[in-house]
Image: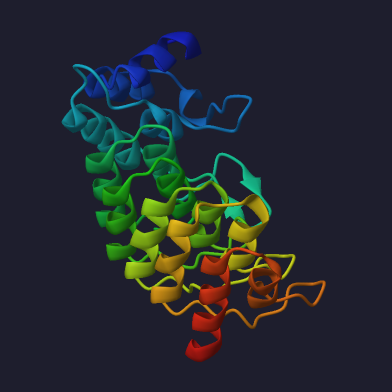
Amino acid sequence: MVSKTRMLDLVRAWDSAEVDAALAGTPGLQDVRDPRGRSWLHVCCGVELSGARKAEDSVRTAEVLLDRGFDINAPAFTEGDWLATPLWYAIGRGHNLPLAAYLLRHGSNPNYCLFAASFANDLEAIRLLVAGGADVDDPSSGGSPFLGAIRWSQFVPAEQLLKLGADVNRVDRDGMTALHCMLKKGSDKAHFAMLIAHGARGDIPDKAGVTAAEIMRRKRDPDFQRMAEQLATST
């Protein structure tokens, strides 16, 4: 018989052989969930790949758990339409791309994870998820991953998402585009060119009926005045 505490240690250590033996020899251990709703598969995927840890050990442990019947897409918890899946733990907590790739090959839903990849400034993870079928405009956390990256001032991931087909004119719950968001928080002017180059429109009104081009025209800065004219000619 293996205790829950001991099992937690085994899963975190990615000791696949002992994890398999524990599940075989301890009735009820498979159904254990922690206070956050995590199964052993979520725990396995959430261990950070760092130091001397080997990704292949995490993959073997995940394989054991899947063979034992753990659901590859079951969420630990939910927030609205967003699901904390094992893949999200591998991307957002484990930063373990080999494990993420394994999960995708074995039927993981590729969605719900682009926000985490963008927040971590992980371009390789973004590309992996989109190649695996993720909706580049996944709305599950509100807005889109691109809008999330803009809000967090993660402009490199934002550009990567645009290159992969993200909608530069997506609006959030307040009707704000990325241009609105950047103007509101005073983003560096250098980043506006990226959005304009990818087809950003300045004529989309927010909930107050104000467009990004109008906000730019009100500024005394000649650079913003020029950008407002660019937006006018591109729509």
- Give whichever of 10, 148 is nearer the camera: 148
Instruction: Judge whether 154 appears above or below 95 on screen.
Output: below
- Give whichever of 224, 116 is nearer the camera: 224
Instruction: Judge whether 44 appears above or below 152 on screen.
Output: above
Query: Along the horizontal axis of the image, is 64 left or right of 206?
Result: left
- Give the percent coordinates (x, y) of residue 158: 42, 58
- Give the percent coordinates (x, y) of residue 3: 47, 10
Q: Is residue 214 visible?
A: yes
Residue at 48% x, 10% y: name it.
5
User: Which quadrant of the structure image shows residue 179?
Assistant: bottom right
Instruction: Judge whether 235 appears above or below 4 on screen.
Output: below
Residue at 64% x, 51% y: name it.
185
Residue at 30% x, 50% y: name it.
123
Q: In the rendered view of the protein, which quadrant contains the N terminus?
A: top left
- Give the percent coordinates (x, y) of residue 28: 51, 25
Residue at 52% x, 74% y: name it.
227
Query: Along the horizontal axis of the image, is 86 left or right of 131?
Result: right
User: Which quadrant of the structure image shows residue 17?
Assistant: top left
Q: Looking at this rendering, what residue extends furthest in the right direction?
A: 208
- Give the percent coordinates (x, y) of residue 7: 41, 15
Q: Is residue 235 visible?
A: no
- Give whichever of 132, 145 is nearer the camera: 145
Is the image coloured rainbow, by chain, by secondary structure, or in one colour? rainbow
- Give whichever of 224, 145 is nearer the camera: 224
User: Which quadrant of the structure image shows residue 93?
Assistant: top left
